[in-house]
Image (spheres, grey):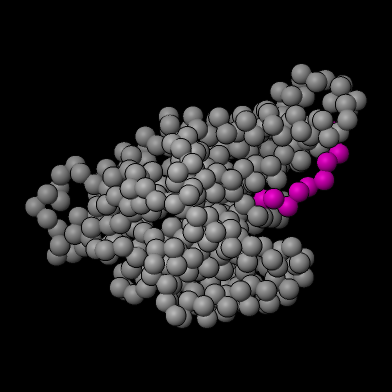
Amino acid sequence: MSTEKSADAPATGTPERGRVATAPVFHGIQALRFVAALLVVLAHVPSYLRHQLGVAVPDVPLGAVGVTVFFVISGFVATVVTSRRPPVDWRAFLWRRVVRIVPLAWTMTTVKLAVAVLDPDQLQRATLTPAYVVLSYAFLPARGSDGIVQPLWTVAWTLSFELLFYLLVAVALAWRTAPLRVVTPVCVALAVAGALRSPTDWPAWQFHADPIVLCFPIGMVVGRWATGRAQRSDAGVVAGLMVSWVLTEWGHGSSLGTVLLLPAAAVVVAGVAASERRTAAVVGRGVLTLGDASYALYLTHPLVVPVAVAAVGRVLGDRALEWPRIAVVALVAVVAVTAATVASVLVWWTVDRPVLRALRRLRAPAPPGRRSARSGSGGGPSS
């Protein structure tokens, strides 16, 4: 692994100043971030093909794969960040996570809110209540006018899970205990509660009661192993988490593919981390940039992909229905993925990265009694 640090790479903290020191970058994990985001993009292409071009294409379950890998990576990164010495302060950890997630998510939510106000006919959720909008900005679950529990910017539903996980890690750091000891029982309890939840008409506050939260502690265990901090109890932890996953997913009546999803994602992340020495030799700066832009790719693609699909439709015209379906699907997929990727890199370099750097220059609050004479200066967490 390299000591070069990307803006969202694992990093260590210096509690007394709220600063975060340079940490290794796992090149393979950075590349895997991009692949996971790409899977989500590809999963949404069929719906745009049906709605905009009238091409009958079945859905592909790639989105669930991408999100599962994302969540396992989040657990992995959290362990790499919090297991280094000196121990990271919980304020610095939470600040870095918030400034990484919130600005771009709020930007995209505001874009959709503006469209809802100016041209509500363009949206499926044209009826918005003030409470629903506020809860969307707060990353808290709310049921929309269509009856679905998801935020105004729909793909931001995953961020509600991410922020819950980061809050649990921050609580563990504040208690000066291993984050896995806090995250694991809470996630298992949520997964079990999800299995007991009514299949329909459950209240929005039960949104986080979902087996998918088990991805986070699994990723944390993989992170401990990858950083040479594995413990004998980890095998039992993994076994218990996997049993919880299988039982709760089967309780939901999930398919075999869904049941195998978390074990497969864990193996992939572990395998990528294990091959870091070989990966670092072949992964260049361009791939690291794609990894950095993966968050922008995930959040912005619902805005970019429909435009790309519509552009292809205008060029093809009636030929979209005359061409072989596989040719249309392939063309649209290539154009959509290319457009979304280029847009995400542009957003990363021109919006996301500068905002992230500016916010990380602000100091996270220093622990009481440990403020230095320089605590009022303009330094702060590095990007």
Instruction: Say how many tags the image has.
Output: 0
Q: Is residue 199 visible?
A: no
Q: Is residue 13 left or right of residue 296?
A: left
Above or below: residue 311 compared with residue 304: above
Q: Is residue 275 left or right of residue 51?
A: left
Counting from the top left corner in percent of width and height, residue 325 is at 86, 33
Q: Is residue 217 above or below residue 68?
A: below
Residue at 53% from the left image edge and 61% from the top image edge: 270
Is 38 or 212 nearer to us in this picture? 38
Q: Quadrant of residue 85?
A: bottom left
Dominant SS of magenta comes to loop
Q: Residue at x 46, y 81 (%)?
A: 233
The quadrant where residue 247 appears: bottom right
Quick check: 301 left or right of 87?
A: right
Q: Is residue 31 visible?
A: yes
Which residues fall within the magenta stretch? 54-63
Name the one closer to the observer, 84 or 312.
84
The residue furthest left is 373
Counting from the top left corner in percent of width and height, residue 215 is at 56, 65
* Residue at the image point whose x is 37% and y is 73% from the top: 178
Residue 31 drawn in magenta: no
Expressed as whole percent of the image width and height from the top left, the position of residue 291 reads: 49, 43
The residue sitting at 78% across, 47% down in the picture is 59
* In this view, 350 is above or below 32: above
Compare residues 6 and 130 and report the one nearer the observer. 6
Quadrant where the C terminus sits is: top left
Please tell me whether residue 53 is drawn above or below residue 146 in the rendered image. Answer: above
Residue 60 in percent (x, y) is at: 76, 49
